[in-house]
């Protein structure tokens, strides 16, 4: 099948995007079906990794993931876990916000769209975990805008997955549970599908539980194995820690298909001029015992969401698996044991969210106007204001009064009436919170505003009407109105960068554009599509840019180090081992110093040594 370049006059350019912790993907509707748009090399998944090389060039995707070991201080993975925070990320000498890193990932996905939509503006439906809070949703929207998209909608990942399923089952009447275990988050939703109407009944989740946690648990286990044999904790070495993380991911993948995985690193690090190695095996049962507490937690959330939906496990007709971590066999076993039937996973669990986001995009654009499918979602958290409660002869502040309750269908508008606490009170502060705890201190503060001009009157006389409006993007508007005078004030919580200033937003956008343009100047131009979606790519590779040289040199360094490590395993001569270690240390030092000339010299010296010892 070939992707044709579409006529802008015949459609509204809009795509669906899964911005994932581990991988991301973009999809669109073509001839009534959702399709994931591949890279020029045919890869449908984009690793959510960003690297800033020594020349200040941005690298996104697989090349960046490959650089995590060689340049761990210049690469960032799993940035999704930082979304909505004020944490900064340092890559080399530059500092980024989490939404800026995510914007670079989205820009890479945007490049895939040029062959379809050209350079025109494209709208996007971007997915987030159902249990993402307000700040995380806004940061995601901000990332999309910084990447050059018009963000049409933010939707929940389980809802998107259900849409992908519902497109082919619009005439069914079913209760579906979506079990979404991704790289960094877990979500579970109960969805009812009836005559094309897809209604989310309840959602729950943990935005800090996913495959990343499994990887780091394996890293801790491997570090313990190393410590037992060498007395060294490899997690204290940045490069060794990156190697362990890569080994953990590989072992996890292997254990999804095989009962046992071999884990080897002939030179994890050097300590006191001696190589530190890792050579061990792990059985699937060992791995399962490590991660079982997390899997048990997911099923606690499954039971909770069923209770919210007022359904038992026997009322669930289908269980949909979403996210790469659902490939773990133990997940399938637990699903089958609890629900009495196997889960459905015929659609790639790592692509189904992007496909579902494309379905939502198609509904919005009219490309799926004849599908007969309509989706409704729910508020993942309760939202309300801070109030006081009677206590003794007075009032105790700091309590949470929910106005929109969790799992209320959205969009929605809810209103409650409050009153003044003291005689002659002319002003109230409306503090808006999101969460489930009865104390506001344990919930998430969304913002506050003052409502003044309250007529002087005895306590409890003047009534204040508080109205919350919550839209499909998960954006909340709160309004407080004095009923007697009709005077009102409102708040709409602003995006993270918008809170600072419009100029800060523009500066961030301009900086990312400059970085991106600098990267594009060094990349070959895509002239056509690959075999699945067109014919051929033409690349002008006569000129090697500085960026190409740096990346090629880093790759060569990795290969050379592996050759040195392999030879160290074979030789018993102490003098030869010392020379091999010396070469390894020189290459590592040059990589850390980011000096290409020194690195080239170190590689040349190592190659000469390898030639001498092997000849």
Image (cartoon, rainbow, N blue to C red):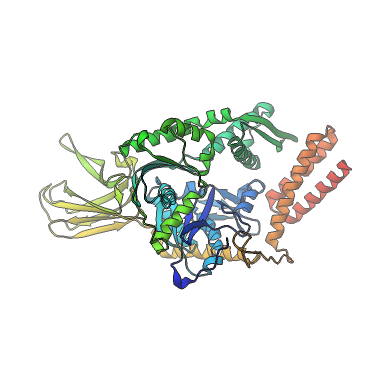
Displayed quadrant of residue 518:
bottom right
Q: Name the side, left or right, on which 280 lies relative to 49.
A: right
In which quarter of the view is residue 539 placed? Answer: bottom right
Q: Is residue 131 above or below residue 450?
A: above
**Measured along the vertical axis of the image, is residue 396 above or below residue 423?**
above
* Residue situated furthest top in the rendering: 228
The residue under the point 72% across, 50% down is 590
Q: Is residue 100 visible?
A: no
- At horizontal 52% and vertical 69% (from top left) the residue drawn is 119
Q: Residue at x 62, y 37 (%)?
A: 254
Nearest the camera: 429 or 402? 402
Closest to the observer: 93 or 173? 173
Q: Residue 138 appears at what percent x and percent y?
A: 40, 54
If the image is split into quadrants, where does the N terminus sit?
A: bottom right
Residue 200 lies, in percent from the top left, at 35, 47
Farthest-out residue, bottom? 9
Measuring from the top left, give residue 11's x and y in whole percent. 44, 68
Report the residue that reaches farthest toward the front: 171
Examine the rendering and report whether any part of residue 458 can be seen.
Answer: yes
Vertical side of 608 occupied by 488: above or below: below
Residue 428 in the image, given as x and y percentages of width and height: 21, 52
- Quarter of the picture holding the C terminus: top right
Q: Quadrant of residue 567?
A: top right
Q: Nearer the viewer, residue 57 or 391?
A: 57
């Amino acid at each position: 099948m070939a992707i044709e370049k579409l006529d802008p006059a015949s459609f509204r350019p809009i795509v669906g995007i899964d911005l994932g912790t581990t991988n991301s993907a973009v999809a669109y509707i073509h001839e009534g079906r959702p399709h994931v748009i591949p890279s020029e090399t045919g890869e449908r998944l984009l690793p959510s990794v960003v690297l800033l090389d020594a020349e200040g060039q941005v690298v996104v995707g697989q090349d960046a993931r490959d650089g995590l070991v060689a340049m761990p201080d210049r690469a960032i993975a799993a940035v999704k876990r930082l979304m909505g925070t004020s944490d900064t990320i340092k890559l080399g000498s530059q500092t980024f916000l989490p939404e800026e890193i995510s914007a670079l990932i989205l820009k890479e996905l945007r490049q895939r769209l040029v062959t379809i939509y050209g350079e025109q503006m494209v709208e996007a439906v971007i997915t987030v975990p159902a249990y993402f809070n307000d700040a995380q949703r806004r940061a995601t929207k901000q990332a999309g805008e910084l990447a050059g998209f018009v963000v049409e909608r933010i939707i929940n990942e389980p809802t998107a997955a259900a849409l992908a399923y519902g497109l082919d089952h619009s005439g069914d009447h079913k209760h579906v549970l979506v079990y979404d275990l991704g790289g960094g988050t877990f979500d579970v939703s109960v969805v009812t599908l009836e005559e094309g109407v897809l209604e989310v009944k309840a959602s729950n989740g943990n935005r800090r539980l996913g495959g990343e946690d499994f990887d780091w648990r394996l890293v801790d286990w491997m570090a313990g194995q190393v410590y037992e044999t060498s007395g060294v904790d490899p997690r204290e070495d940045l490069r060794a820690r990156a190697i362990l993380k890569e080994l953990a991911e590989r072992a996890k993948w292997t254990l999804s298909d095989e009962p046992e995985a071999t884990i080897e690193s002939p030179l994890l690090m050097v300590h006191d001029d001696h190589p530190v190695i890792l050579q061990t095996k792990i059985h699937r049962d060992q791995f399962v015992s490590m991660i079982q507490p997390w899997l048990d937690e997911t099923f606690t959330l499954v039971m909770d969401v069923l209770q919210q939906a007022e359904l038992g496990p026997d009322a669930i007709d289908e269980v949909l698996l979403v996210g790469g971590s659902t490939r773990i066999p133990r997940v399938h076993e637990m699903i089958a044991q609890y629900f009495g039937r196997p889960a459905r996973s015929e659609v790639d669990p790592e692509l189904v969210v992007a496909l579902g986001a494309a379905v939502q995009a198609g509904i919005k654009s009219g490309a799926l106007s004849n599908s007969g499918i309509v989706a409704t979602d729910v508020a993942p958290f309760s939202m309300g204001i801070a109030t006081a409660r009677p206590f003794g002869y007075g009032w105790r502040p700091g309590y949470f009064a929910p106005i929109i309750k969790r799992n209320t269908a959205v969009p929605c508008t809810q209103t409650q009436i409050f009153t003044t606490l003291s005689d002659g009170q002319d002003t109230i502060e409306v503090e808006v919170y999101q969460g489930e705890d009865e104390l506001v201190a344990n919930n998430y503060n969304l913002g506050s505003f003052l409502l003044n001009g309250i007529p002087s009157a005895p306590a409890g006389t003047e009534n204040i009407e508080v109205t919350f409006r919550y839209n499909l993007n998960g954006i909340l508007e709160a309004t407080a109105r004095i009923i007697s005078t009709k005077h009102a004030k409102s708040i709409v919580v602003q995006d993270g960068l918008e809170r600072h200033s419009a100029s800060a937003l523009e500066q961030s956008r301009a900086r990312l554009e400059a970085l991106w343009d600098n990267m594009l100047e060094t990349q070959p131009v895509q002239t056509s599509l690959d075999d699945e979606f067109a014919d051929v790519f033409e690349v002008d590779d006569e000129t090697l840019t500085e960026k190409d040289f740096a990346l090629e040199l880093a790759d060569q360094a990795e290969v050379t180090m592996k050759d040195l490590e392999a030879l160290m395993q074979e030789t018993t001569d102490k003098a030869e081992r010392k020379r091999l270690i010396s070469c390894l240390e020189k290459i590592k030092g040059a990589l850390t110093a980011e000096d290409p000339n020194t690195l080239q010299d170190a590689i040349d010296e190592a190659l000469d040594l390898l030639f001498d010892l092997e000849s």
